[in-house]
Structures are given as C-alpha cells and as structure tokens.
C-alpha cells in the first residue's frame, strides 16, 4: 500500500475545511504547490441517500487530483457504500473522519466520539478498506480530553486494519479549535506505527511546517486555517522542504489579482448569487493584516451588493499605492 501513496511523503496538504474546501479553493491551493487536497467533511448518509447537495461536494476536475474525500458516519456498512460512491466520482483517496468535534456530528455517533469506541472504529475502518481499492486514511484527534489521550492506540488499530496513513490533529475533542495543538502527540503516534503520519494543527507559516517535521518526524503536514487568505503558504512550505530560500509572500498586485481570480472561479462554480455572498469571508481573510484593512473589513462585512464590495476593494488597494495604475487605468 505504501507504494500507492508516495505522494503522501514530504509535502503539504490542504485539510478538509467545512464550508471552504470547495473545488475553487482546492485549485487555488494546488496552484501554489499543495500536492493533495481534501473535500470538506461529507456525510456518508447523504451520499448513500443520493442527496444532491451532498453529491455537490464531490465536484472535481482533472486539475484537482489527487483528491482526498473525507467522509463521516457511525455505521460501517453506510460508510463502506459512501466510500464506493466517492471513488466512482473521482476520489483518489478516502479519509475517515474520527476527529470532528461538532456536537451534531458527535450526537450521531460519528466524528471524534469514535475515539471512545475503538471496536466500532475498527469495524468502520475495515469495512471502508474492503469496499474500495484506493488508499484509506484516518483522521483523528489527540483524544477525547487531556486525561484520555489515546491517539497512538487508535492509530495502531487503524494500522492493523490496513489504513494507508494516519492524520493527527493534535488537539483533544474538548479543545475544539481553541488552545494550542500539542505536537508531542504527533510524535507519539509516529513512534507507535509504521504507516505514514500526517501532522495537523497550528501551521500558520512555512516555518511552522518545518518545525513540526523536525519535532515530530511526521511524514507530511496538513494545513487548515493557516491557508485562509494565504494560499501562498503552500509555496513557502514547498520551498523550505526543498531546501530553498523562502520567498513566497505575494506583492499587493499579486494578492489583488488572486482575490479577483478566486472570486471569478467561485462564481463559475456555484453561480454569481451564491458566490457573491459566500466569498465575503475570503475577502476578509485575504486582506487581514494589510495596512488599513480594519476599516475595509468593517465596511465589507455589512455590504450586500457585489458591485459595492468590488468598488471598496479597488479603493482599498488604491490606498495601498502599489497597484493604483493597474486597477484604475
């Protein structure tokens, strides 16, 4: 199995991000060196029931490969069938979610609560692996809480069941997405298993990726929130992994161009009406930290019309000086 997943080693991957990891976002990340991208977490029940909304999460294209599809559920037979559907739709890899802390997911017996039920976890992993011919990975957390850190145990079970790799988000369930990730858990998992280990949590800049690999000996890193508004982070990580000098930060002109390109891609993917509403969050992320961005972000946050948002975007970048001649010919 390891020969099938050589692309898992020494690279940076895009994490499944709810409401964010759609096809345009994945393509943007890939354009800067992301070698493996995942869909957002998809309901196995939704796939099996042939829900149009759920199937929409699987939309992909030739440039969006290899594609990892992350599924969640509590029943092994349903998870197996969902995995088959995902592969039929173009998935090159199936990832089983055993780390989601969202309450509505936990209440169904899926997500992070599976770490409290190793036997059920094993049944699900085994069923999914038997159902498909592509690699199957498992994404876990450190444990349920700090007094029950069992990532190494669950990783061992996943390995015994035949999982191709394990992805470790180094926070506990009760941390949610707050507090600091404890990378020592990733190191513990790496020592416990022989399959590749992908580290996840608190990679906010390329240097964090290098530090995670040095401290944990993980085989690859997964970037989540650190990529929001900063897809260039993948370029920086690739440069450092290759031993090159880090030179990845975009100019203001490049940032402006990427905002507009990404917005157009979203409109082509989901239609102008939906894109104009959903892209607002990306505008806020892309401009975060720029001089004077607080005022721009405050204005755009409550602005309903796309045309006015575009006008404000142009005015904002004009005020930064570098690209005034390009956006106002």
Image (cartoon, rainbow, N blue to C red):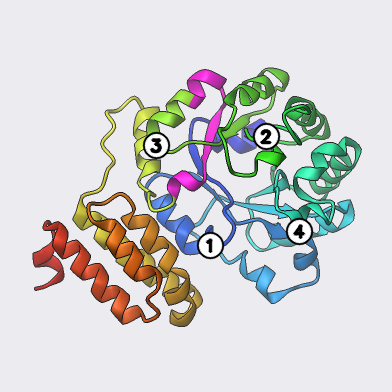
Where does label 2 land, which residue? 165
Query: x, y (%) of residue 110?
Result: 80, 51
Where does label 4 land, which residue? 104
Query: Which circle's residue, 4 or 2, is located before the other in the chain?
Result: 4
Residue placed most toward the observer, 125 or 223: 223
Query: Which circle's residue, 4 or 3, is located before the other in the chain?
Result: 4
Q: Nearer the viewer, mark 1 or mark 3?
A: 3
At 74% from the left and 33% from the top, the residue drawn is 145
Query: Which circle's residue, 1 or 2, is located before the other in the chain?
Result: 1
Where does label 1 land, which residue? 22
Range of the magenta residues? 212-227
Measured in 3D between alpha carbons, the distance from the residue under mark 3 to the one under mark 2, in whole angstroms, is: 24 Å
Q: Are marks 4 and 2 in contact (CB under 8 Å)?
A: no
Q: Which quarter shows the N terminus?
A: top right
Query: x, y (%) of residue 282?
Result: 41, 61
Residue 242 colored in magenta in the image:
no
Q: Would residue 68 be found to the left or right of residue 48 on screen?
A: left
């Amino acid at each position: 199995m390891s020969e099938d997943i050589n692309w898992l080693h020494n690279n940076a991957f895009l994490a499944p991000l709810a409401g964010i990891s759609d096809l345009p976002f994945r393509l943007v990340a890939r354009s800067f060196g992301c070698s493996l991208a995942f869909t957002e977490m998809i309901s196995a029940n939704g796939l099996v029931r042939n829900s149009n909304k759920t199937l929409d999460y699987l939309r992909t294209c030739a440039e969006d490969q290899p594609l990892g599809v992350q599924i969640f559920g509590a029943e092994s037979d349903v998870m197996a069938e969902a995995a088959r559907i995902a592969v039929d739709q173009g998935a090159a890899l199936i990832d089983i979610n055993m780390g989601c802390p969202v309450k509505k997911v936990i209440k169904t017996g899926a997500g992070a609560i599976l770490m409290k039920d190793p036997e059920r976890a094993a049944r699900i992993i085994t069923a999914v692996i038997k159902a498909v011919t592509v690699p199957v990975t498992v994404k876990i957390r450190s444990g349920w809480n700090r007094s029950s850190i069992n990532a190494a145990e669950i990783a061992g079970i996943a390995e015994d069941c035949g999982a191709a790799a394990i992805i470790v988000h180094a926070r506990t369930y009760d941390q949610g997405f707050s507090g600091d990730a404890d990378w020592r858990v990733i190191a513990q998992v790496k020592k416990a298993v022989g399959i590749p280990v992908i580290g996840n949590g608190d990679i906010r800049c390329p240097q964090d990726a290098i530090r995670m690999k040095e401290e944990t000996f993980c085989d690859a890193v997964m970037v989540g929130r650190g990529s929001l508004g900063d897809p260039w982070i993948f370029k920086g990580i690739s440069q450092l992994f290759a031993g090159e000098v880090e030179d990845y930060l975009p100019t203001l002109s490049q940032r402006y161009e990427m905002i507009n390109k990404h917005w157009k891609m979203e409109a082509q993917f989901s239609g102008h009406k939906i894109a104009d509403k959903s892209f607002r969050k990306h505008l806020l992320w892309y401009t975060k930290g720029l001089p004077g961005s607080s005022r721009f972000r405050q204005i755009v946050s409550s602005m309903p019309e796309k045309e006015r948002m575009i006008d404000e975007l142009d005015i904002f970048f004009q005020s930064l000086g570098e690209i005034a001649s390009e956006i106002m010919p």
